[in-house]
Image (cartoon, coloured by chain):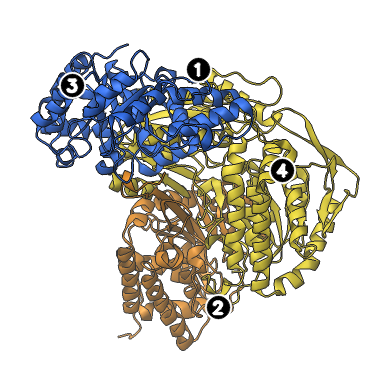
Amino acid sequence: MPTNAPSAAHALADVTASDSSLRRFLHGLPGVDAVGLEARAASLGTRSIKTTAKAYAIDLAISMVDLTTLEGADTPGKVRALGAKAVHPDPTDRTTPATAAVCVYPDMVAAAKEAVAGSSVKVASVATSFPAGRAALDVKLSDVRDAVAAGADEIDMVIDRGAFLAGRYAKVYDEIVAVREACGTGARLKVIFETGELSTYDNIRRASWLGMLAGADFIKTSTGKVAVNATPANTLLMLEAVRDFRAQTGVQVGVKPAGGIRTSKDAIKFLVLVNETVGEDWLDNHWFRFGASSLLNDLLMQRQKLATGRYSGPDYVTVD
Amino acid sequence: MSDARLSVFKTYKLYVGGKFPRSESGRVYEVTDAKGKWLANAPLSSRKDARDAVVAARKAFGGWAGATAYNRGQVLYRVAEMLEGRRAQFVHEVADAEGLSKSKAAEQVDATIDRWVWYAGWTDKIAQVIGGGNPVAGPYFNLSSPEPTGVVAVVAPQESSFLGLVSVLAPVIATGNTAVVVTSEKSPLPALSLAEVLATSDVPGGVVNVLSGVTAEIATPLAAHQDVNAIDLAGADEVLAKELEIAAADNLKRVLRPQPVDDWSATPGIDRMTAFLETKTVWHPTGSLGASGSSY
Amino acid sequence: MASVFEYAPAPESRSIVDIAPSYGLFIDGEFVEAADGKVFKTVSPSSEEVLSEIAQAGAEDVDRAVKAARRAFEKWSALPGAERAKYLFRIARIIQERSRELAVLETLDNGKPIKETRDADLPLVAAHFFYYAGWADKLDHAGFGLNPKPLGVAGQVIPWNFPLLMLAWKIAPALATGNTVVLKPAETTPLSALFFADICRQAGLPKGVVNILPGYGDTGAALVAHPDVDKVAFTGSTAVGKEIARTVAGSRKKLTLELGGKGANIVFDDAPIDQAVEGIVNGIFFNQGQVCCAGSRLLVQESIQDELLDSLKRRLSTLRLGDPLDKNTDIGAINSAEQLTRITSLVEQGEAEGAERWSPACELPTAGYWFAPTLFTNVTQAHRIARDEIFGPVLSVLTFRTPDEAVAKANNTPYGLSAGIWTEKGSRILAVANKLRAGVVWSNTFNKFDPTSPFGGYKESGFGREGGRHGLEAYLDV
């Protein structure tokens, strides 16, 4: 699969030369009408996904979950439990697909790696002084190197929103490029924009392109730590961005909405967005993820309901 | 030495596109006063004059409709000013035309001047009275505003040759329409003289075009004309009005049917303005200030 | 678009609506047979299944209905406005209660997707009655002077594209202002109007205030020609509108017409492209393009034509055509065989005139009346598909170079109902909106409707406004 980011950057090399050239390019992207964007997202939200399609969507959604714990209180024990759940989400039904990854802080990567060993489940680590990203570049890079050295398959970095909002696009760009380098060849890079802080849809579109130009393998909405995280509208907008980026550069980039997606119904709405915006090329956990924790249990309960015909309850899924 | 000086007669002409042509037909008809005394020969307009007048009115429409309402008000007020200066002339012409005493004719002329003042004041208010924002149930800014319909054919009242004429003409142009006026058939002279006032009152050429002659002969091609947007049938009798309304249906002209008017000097409402206004409604999304304000 | 994520059928249940095998005319509060006993069948355009047999009103029935409306007028118009308001509020509420049933019914009889009847038609119908209910006791404050009087009996003829919504646009303001009505629904979609008669019954509306006369064009012609009708309101084709204007010429009948259109949707190079694509799709494929205010002419700035067309074609490929009762259907059936023939013939002419035709890969059902979403490029103002109202899912794409040219092309039509403008530049929106000769201008959106928002045309798209305070004028003696 094409993940040759440097060539994309090369194609648009002039664009990334300076703050002003980046500004000209990013501000030359088509504007976003907020009402129209939200209306389209809402309209796709009315799709009615039933029976076989629902079963397909639930399994797909489970396989796309980055099962996440990002708390100060995280311990190796908690992370081990999470890893076990990622590998076998439903102990009563071994046909349940594994999740895509577990997502933890860098110091928990080793424990996570151990917990998912031998499975398809990847270990993703937030880094770059997550969630605020307010640290010097070398601190961020050392954070990343730590996580990679501990075996992280994926790095979820945060961009410098302050620099972005101040128009210092080159700084944001350079940082992503540096983190990309620190990831080496082994780890895929997810770039978190914290869309809730970027505040406008125009900014989200610009950040998406900035991230992709800098070599992101994934663009990701949020940290889950602010008031507004993933929404159908901002995810739709980012899907449009990866679609247009591939059309222009040939490079495919993944999308990860994170935070606030708690129910199967919500998850299926996001899959509909993917299906009808970028199509089946992205309907795979290599290209689309859900950053979530409580979502998985709801998906499992819905899966049980479809299998048995009766509604399940929280006692029939694990609390990990 | 004789004290009787031979007066200079006026040659009455049409008013089309800001110019004073004779009728394309080359024909005139005799206009008499109420007692049958010869007053003048008036141009007998043909269907080609009507056609030329429509072309002139269409050409003038963009500029007049696009002028600021304040500017149109200034121009209409200027008409009143100029009429005031020629009051004596119009008292004389109206008295002759309608068989009125000097004092009755003066009342008519005064009311006519005041009518221009009334409409001069309306130009920049009508949009606020009949337009406005609409509170739609959604994240949209929604505004309705009146716009002039376009070229309006005005069949002026037959009896009230001056006050009646201005009462139907002024509301048409106040809002930015342009007009082709068919004068009173038997009393066209005050209307033709009014054209001279309009020509010297900053009213752009073509905004008002004045045609005298046989009402049915001029009004019929106007009612059928595909580039006329509306017609005021004030001066058409019942039979003619129906014929004209049928012809007007060909391009769905807005039709103002004749209504009995007892007293043209009564304060007009806004109906004659709204009859030749379209309502345009413009929608635009508003939405929240930013993505973070959106609900999920 | 074949995808690994194939949506399973999700049909709305038909059992919620109980369609009787036959319906009479609704006159003076009773369902009655036509005087001459004539009936016609109404079919479901998506399957050609006969839904019911409907009494067909003739001249004698028109006379009966007008007499009933005249009798009812005296008391109805004398009711305090607050009381009329309460009847209308009741109707609005009952429509909300029965909205799922009515949505399914409308989808069955009209062929449009349940998504639209459920999310657009029915909410707007209820909202329209709510809106005008509130006016009934506030007419003194509506700007038409104190105590404005109703006209009397309103003869109303409505089309088949939004059967119940057009009924609401006609009946709600008429009743609020104290008129009584005789309404003729379209011959292909009579059912929701007859269900509305039942809603009037449930609301306890006095008999004769609303009369419903299903029938064909001759029924409508008899209604508008009836000498005891004081007001004629028509929504439909421009040709019929002109005929009606001739019919009422010289009479006292107040006339409002809401007719055809050939709306221009103007996309500038600085448009919010993804939303513009949605707006274009919504503009011409909403209700299969059978919308008088459809954005049937796409005027795209030449510099972004290729990019926009690529996006548009990609988007059209995701449209889901099929069973209108399926909640995931975007494109339903064409309303009638006759309409399908008209669309087909105009599209063939477009091809014959050299325009380039494109449709997404799209399988059409074997039964029923269907037409694939269609796009024509290389279209000029001289092509018939750029001038005639097609009233179907057919978009003609033209280009322009400057705002002046866009406006000139947009206005170069005898119609003047709607237009769209897409640009991120605010001053350009206002400047272009100002120059467009159209009654409704949508900027950075399209096909939005609201009971508070006046709707109606310039030029041959008709006259008078429906909706808002403006909509009262058509039913008042002012």
Q: Amino acid at mark 3?
A: Arg
Which of labels 3 and 1 is toward the front?
Answer: 3
Element at label 4: loop
Identified by mark 2, the residue type is Ala
Marking on residue C4: 1
Residue A109 percent location from the top left of the image: 25, 24
- Left of C151 or right of it: where is C399? left
Residues behind callouts 2 and 4 on a single chain = no
- The chain to which mark 2 is attached is B
Q: Nearer the viewer, residue A124 or C411?
A: A124
Q: CA distance from mark 2 to mark 4?
A: 57 Å
Judging from the image, mark 3 belongs to the subunit labelled A
Q: Amino acid at mark 1?
A: Val
Q: Secondary structure beneath disc 3?
A: helix
Q: Which residue does the image show at 69% across and 29% down from the upper left?
A: C46
- Can residue A156 be seen here? The reply is yes
For marks 3 and 1, give the CA distance: 32 Å
Is the C-beta separation of discs 1 and 2 under 8 Å?
Answer: no
Tag 1: Cα neighbours inside 10 Å, few (<14), some, or many (≥20)? few
